Image (cartoon, rainbow, N blue to C red):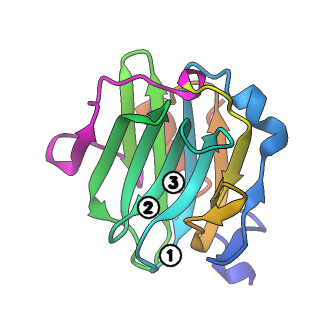
């Protein structure tokens, strides 16, 4: 219903089973990005792994994913040749059934996770692999042939399907600034150029 939209007149309503957006036609273009930003408004109360966006190869060894893990923590995960090079996980849980703005920016000086316009730093993040200085983006992947919103395909099966709402999903070919992130998270009050 319109009352549940966060931005504008539409959203993705995903039930966690076979619902996702296939962006494979854009995967090759996205795979050339040396820096970038992925952002979306999300609303879920489900736990467990849930994919917001994934760009990857066809066998699951090279991918870059923005997703929720565990009990609703935001994660940026990059794997190259089956080896995890970056894994940043927020300590905050954002699966409370309310709209939350989730994003990752990747630039020459590293990456940042953002929740509701606030950059997650220090104790707000854990790094099982890599560090905030890791600047691995889509161009670090070999064979970026798949791109999905709301799930990821592995060996012909959809996995980590999102159970909730996704609105105003965006990908930029540059790392947005803190000012840009504040505009995006202000619920439709801005559109970074």
Q: Are the residues at dot 1 and dot 2 in contact (C-beta closer than 8 Å)?
A: yes
Q: Relative to residue 138, is residue 99 drawn left or right?
A: left
SS state under label 3: loop
User: Is 136 part of what is drawn in magenta?
Assistant: yes
User: Is 137 part of what is drawn in magenta?
Assistant: yes
Sequence order check, earlier mark of 3 and 2: 2
Q: Relative to residue 177, is residue 159 drawn left or right?
A: right
Q: Which residue is mark 3?
A: 186
Q: CA distance from mark 3 to mark 1?
A: 19 Å
Q: Give the camera-side residue of 140 and 61.
A: 61
The residue at the point 68 percent across, 82 percent down is: 3
The residue at the point 29 percent across, 30 percent down is: 132
Relative to residue 115, is residue 178 depicted above or below? Answer: above
Task: Return the mark for residue 44.
Answer: 1
Sequence order check, earlier mark of 1 and 2: 1
Residue 145 position within the rendered picture, expressed as x and y whole percent measured from the top left: 74, 37
Tell me where the magenta segment starts and ends, as one range: 115-140
Residue 138 position within the rendered picture, expressed as x and y whole percent measured from the top left: 58, 28
Q: CA distance from mark 1 to mark 2?
A: 10 Å
Q: Which residue is mark 2?
A: 68
Sequence order check, earlier mark of 3 and 1: 1
Q: CA distance from mark 3 to mark 2?
A: 21 Å
């Amino acid at each position: 219903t319109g009352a549940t939209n966060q931005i504008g007149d539409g959203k993705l309503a995903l039930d966690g089973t076979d619902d996702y957006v296939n962006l494979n036609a854009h995967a090759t273009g996205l795979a050339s990005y040396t820096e970038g930003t992925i952002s979306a408004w999300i609303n879920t109360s489900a736990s467990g792994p849930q994919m917001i966006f994934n760009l990857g190869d066809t066998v699951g060894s090279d991918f870059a994913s923005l997703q929720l893990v565990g009990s609703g923590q935001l994660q940026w995960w990059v794997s190259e040749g089956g080896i995890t090079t970056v894994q940043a996980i927020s300590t905050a849980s954002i699966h409370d059934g309310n709209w939350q703005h989730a994003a990752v920016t990747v630039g020459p000086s590293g990456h940042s996770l953002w929740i509701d316009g606030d950059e997650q730093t220090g104790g707000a993040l854990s790094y099982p692999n890599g560090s905030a200085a890791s600047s691995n983006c889509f161009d670090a992947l070999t064979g970026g042939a798949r791109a999905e919103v709301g799930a990821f395909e592995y060996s012909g099966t959809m996995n980590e399907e999102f159970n909730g709402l996704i609105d105003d999903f965006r990908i930029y070919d540059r790392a947005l600034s803190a000012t840009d992130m504040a505009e995006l998270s202000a619920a439709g009050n801005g559109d970074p150029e």
